[in-house]
Image (tube, rainbow, N blue to C red):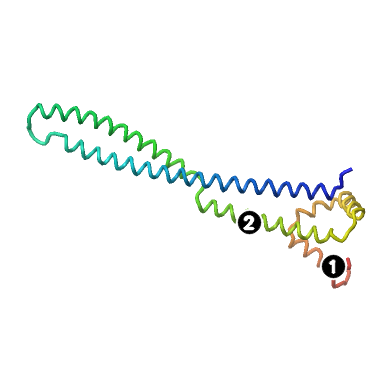
Amino acid sequence: RVKPGIDRERYRSQDARIYAMQISELHRQIKNLREERDSTSEKLANTHHKLQQSLQQIQRLQPKSGQAKAAEADKSQDARELAGKLQKAREEVMSLRKENANLRERPTLEDFQKAQRIIFNLEQKLTEENQVKNTARRYLDTRELVRIDKMNHRLGLDIMNSVPKAQLVLYLQEICRVLEISSPDLV
C-alpha cells in the first residue's frame, strides 16, 4: 500500500519538475523569437537598400531628353530588367513587412519579464509551502502521519491547502484568543 503523504510529495515534486521544464521551454522560445525578429529586421533593411539602388538606376536609365533612339533601346532593355528586379524587391519587402507584423504580435520583452516575475513568485510560494510542510512533518512518525491524513480527508480539511497563508494565520490567532493561550503549539 502507498502512503498518502508520500504520494502527495511525489506529485508536488513532479509538478515542480514539469514547471521547471515549462520555464526552460519558454526561455528557448523567447530566444528563438528574438533571433527571428532580428533576422527579419536585417532582411527588411537590406531589401529596402536594394530597392533604393534599383530606383536610382531606373531614374538614371530613363531618357531625360530626345537622345538617340538606339541608346534608348538598350536602356529600355535594362529598364525592363530593373523593373523586374524592382517588382521582386517590392514583393520581398511586402513579405518582410508581413513577417515583421507577425513578429509584433508575439510576446514582447516586457511580457516575458512579467511572466518571469509571476514564475518567480510562484516558485517562492511553492518553496515556502514545502518548507513549512516538511518542518511540521519531520517530527511525526509514519503512523501518526497516516492517521492525520485520514482524519484530514474525513473532515474535509484538504481544502485548507487552497486558503491563503495570511488567512490561516488570522484563523490560528483567533483560535489562540478563544482558548486564551499565547502559543499555537499548545493548540
- Which residue does the numbered mark 2 point to in the structure image? 120
- Report the residue at 68% width, 45% height from top: 18
Number of numbered callouts drawn:
2
The amino acid pointed to by label 1 is Pro
**On screen, residue 13 above or below 94:** below
Give the class, few, some or many, for how many residues have Cα within 10 Å of label 1's Cα (few <14, many ≥20): few
- The image position of residue 158, as x and y in percent, is 82, 51
In the visual, does 133 lie left or right of 94?
right
**On screen, residue 134 above or below 39:** below
The amino acid pointed to by label 2 is Phe
- Report the residue at 73% width, 58% height from top: 164
Label 1: element kind = helix
- The image position of residue 142, as x and y in percent, is 90, 53
- The image position of residue 143, as x and y in percent, is 92, 53
- Which residue does the numbered mark 1 point to in the structure image? 184
- The image position of residue 64, as x and y in percent, is 11, 36
State the quadrant of the N terminus. Answer: top right
Which of the labelled discs sits on residue 13, or is there none?
Answer: none
**On screen, residue 55 above or below 130:** above
Disc 2 vs disc 1: Cβ atoms closer than 8 Å?
no
- Report the residue at 67% width, 48% height from top: 19
In the visual, does 79 lie left or right of 25?
left
**Viewer-proximal residue, 145 or 176?**
145
Q: Earlier in the sequence, mark 2 or mark 1?
A: 2
Estimate the spatial distance between the alpha carbons at disc 2 and disc 1, rounded to whole Å: 30 Å
